[in-house]
Image (cartoon, rainbow, N blue to C red):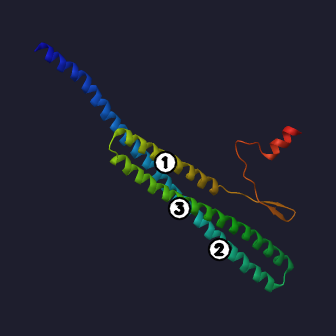
Amino acid sequence: MKTFIAGLMLASLVLVPMAAISAEAAQSISDRTSKAVGVAEAACQKGLENKEVAQKAADLASAALEKARTDLKLAEASGDKEKIAAGQAAVMKAKLVAADKARVLARVSSLVERLKVNLDKARAAAAAVAKAPTPAEALKELRTLEQIAVTAGNILKSIEAAMKPHHPVDIIGITIPCITTSTTRPTPTQVGQIRG
C-alpha cells in the first residue's frame, strides 16, 4: 500500500508540472496569435489612414492645377507677357505636383489593398491555429500567422516610404525628379567624395 501511495505521489509530481507546462504553452500560443492578428489589423488601419492623407493631397494638387489653368487663361486674356509666362510656369509646376501626388495615391492604394488581403489571411490563419487538433499543428499554423504579420509590417513600411515627399530639382528650366537612395548604399555625392 505504501508503495502504491508513493507511486501516486511520484506520478502527481510529474503530471502536475507537465499540465502546467501544457497550459502555459496553450496560453503562449493564444497570446502570440492575438498579437500577430493585432499587428496585421494595426498595419491595415494605419495604411487606410495614409491612403486618406494621400487622397487629400492628390485632391489639393488637382485643385491647384485647375486654379493655375484658370489664372493662365486670365493672364492670356490680359495680354500681359510677364503674367502669361508666370502663368505657364505655374501650370507646369502644378502639373508636376499633381502627377506626383496621383502617383503616390495609386501606389498607396495598391499597397492598402495588399494589406486588406494580408489581414484576411491573418484572420484565416488565426482560425486555423484555434482549430488545430494538436499543439504541434497549432504551432505550425502560428508560425504561418506570424510570417503574415511580418509581411504586414513590411507593406506598411513601403506605404510610409511612398508617402515621403520627393522634391523635384529645377536646373535651367529642366525638372529632374529627386532620386531616393538606399540607406545601405552610399549616395552619388559620397561616391564622388570617396573617389575624389
In the rendered structure, which amino acid carries the disc numbered 1? Ala
> Which secondary structure, mark 1?
helix
Is 117 in front, or is 192? 117
Q: Quick one: which residue is furthest to the right in this view?
A: 196
Disc number lying in front (1 or 2): 1
Residue 72, percent across and down? 76, 79
Q: Earlier in the sequence, mark 1 or mark 2?
A: 2
Q: Are marks 3 and 2 in contact (CB under 8 Å)?
A: no
The residues bearing labels 1 and 2 have C-alpha atoms spaced at a distance of 38 Å
The residues bearing labels 1 and 3 have C-alpha atoms spaced at a distance of 15 Å
Q: Which mark is residue 39?
A: none
In the rendered structure, which amino acid carries the disc numbered 3? Glu
Q: Quarter of the image holding residue 87?
A: bottom right
Residue 124, percent across and down? 41, 54
- The residue to which callout 2 is attached is 63
Q: Residue at x 65, y 74 (%)?
A: 63
Number of labelled discs? 3
- Report crowding for label 2: few under 14, some 14 to 19, many 20 or more residues within 10 A (C-alpha): some
- The residue to which callout 1 is attached is 149
Q: Residue at x 29, y 28 (%)?
A: 18
The residues bearing labels 3 and 2 have C-alpha atoms spaced at a distance of 26 Å
- The residue to which callout 3 is attached is 113
Q: Residue at x 31, y 33 (%)?
A: 22
Q: Are marks 1 and 2 in contact (CB under 8 Å)?
A: no
Horizontal side of 182 relative to 189 (left or right) equals: left
In the rendered structure, which amino acid carries the disc numbered 2? Ala
Residue 189, percent across and down? 82, 45
